[in-house]
Amino acid sequence: LACEPLVGSMVQPYLMRLNTPVSEAQAKAAVRDLLSAFPRLRAILEPTRRRFQWQILPDDARLDQMFDQAFRVDHIDLDKPEAVLRWHELAANEPMNMHHGLGVRVQYAPHPTRPGLMLGVHHLLVDGRSMIHFIESLMKRLNGQPIEPQPLENNSMLPAVLPASWWQWPGKLYQAWQHLRAQAQEHARHEIVRLPGTHGLRHTACAVKHHHLGCSAKDLSRLGKAWGGSSNSVLTAAVGTAMLRRRGTSPKAAALMRMGVDLRRYHPADARPLLGNQVSVFDVLLPAHVPEPERVAWVDARVRAGLARYERREVLLPLLPYEMLGWLRPHDYWRLMLGVQRKGRLPALSCHLTNIGGVDAFNAPEAEVRLSELYPVVSGLVPLLVLVVINGQQTMVTSHPRGTYLDADVKQLIDDTREVLQQWLVQGLGNTA
């Protein structure tokens, strides 16, 4: 039980809606094949002399018994959005005991035309990009295709950030230190705009919400091109603008948004891992003094500059501490995080954003069983905004700790973001579609 409550609650429940009836037996068999194909999904925590370590369970009858406990059927009224949302939120708040069970939970909800399937995997096992691969494999399996078995891979991020030669280390470390110092100085010159909140002294419930932003992905892409960026830049700039409009009356105000980076693209081409935790982050600062029509290009330039540092291998210094987390015992990690949270020493962030892309990308052209909706989520210490395109429309899934932020404040942020997007579409494209 040392992983609970903080680490045990780091569950990633990805809620899927299918376009055609799929039986309980079909869904169960498909997910069971995932466990056979991907050894990481069979990992449990076992104690050693010094700490807990991962142990990969054999693919045998005992695993079948554990999977029977991990798979369950929930009778949910999937035609009621509030019931679906409650189902999703309960899954995000149910801790996993990884000493006596799998780090995987599957929940199936029958429906005459559009059944629901929720795949939850512990964040210690994999990151969001791994979850995407699981869903891609699951959709192939539901359409009768086999899942290709994968080996257990090294989870280290270092190959993605280490310089090519040993003699480059001093220069790259110095450049990383220079950037961190310059970034800290820039942040100190601004007043970071955040939602009202309090420091949580205990683990609290994670709120989950599904939001439809009322605009199409194609229009956002067109607006991004017109204003010198991409649809992702438009959405990031819109969230930052919504924060600034609510709380950014000071000329020194700035929104500080944290974005994820998939490190797989920076690994050597012949050794890129498929699964694991291979995600880093960088911050995008949007000052209030930047005019609104220029904010998309500003954010796009900041994103490109952040990614260029990964290309140049200038991010080794901030990633080294993450590689050391594996040497911490779970309860030591809990004590560390809880202490930082209670002392108010967490980074002053406006929010955390990540973009999944479009749901249609998960469906093969000839597929009969298709993914029609997808709602990814994971708990965090600041508001997390996950962007996903469903049926061509831009959707946002949010999560936040209720002990720190109020539901009404997060809802207002999304409403303001929707208003900003509508105004920008009129200004940039002359329509509100």
Image: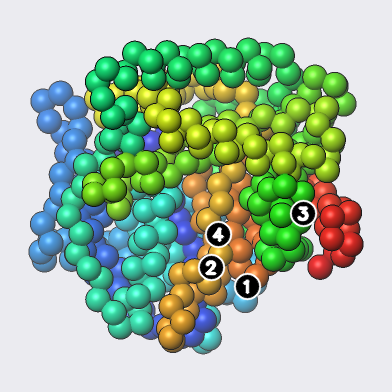
Between disc 1 and disc 4, whose residue precedes?
4
Q: Residue at x 59, y 59 (%)?
A: 388
Q: Which mark is residue 321?
A: none
Above or below: residue 274 compared with residue 135: above
Q: Could you tell me if the residues under marks 2 and 3 are in contact, i.e. CB atoms within 8 Å?
A: no
In the picture, the quarter occupied by the C terminus is bottom right
| In-image side of 236 versus 135 (left or right) | right
Q: Secondary structure at mark 4?
A: strand
State how far apart marks 1 and 4 are (Cα). Answer: 11 Å
Q: Secondary structure at mark 2?
A: helix
Between disc 1 and disc 3, whose residue precedes?
3
Q: Residues within 10 Å of mark 4 (few under 14, many from 20)?
A: some
Q: Could you tell me if the residues under marks 2 and 1 are in contact, i.e. CB atoms within 8 Å?
A: yes
Q: Residues within 10 Å of mark 2 (few under 14, many from 20)?
A: some
Q: Which residue is mark 4?
A: 357
Residue 287 at what x, y percent from top left? 76, 28
Residue 318 at what x, y percent from top left? 42, 23
| In-image side of 335 versus 111 (left or right) | left
Residue type pointed to by label 1: Asn
Q: Which mark is residue 226?
A: 3
Q: Which residue is mark 2?
A: 359
Between disc 3 and disc 4, whose residue precedes?
3
Q: Nearer the viewer, mark 2 or mark 3?
A: 3
Above or below: residue 277 compared with residue 19: above
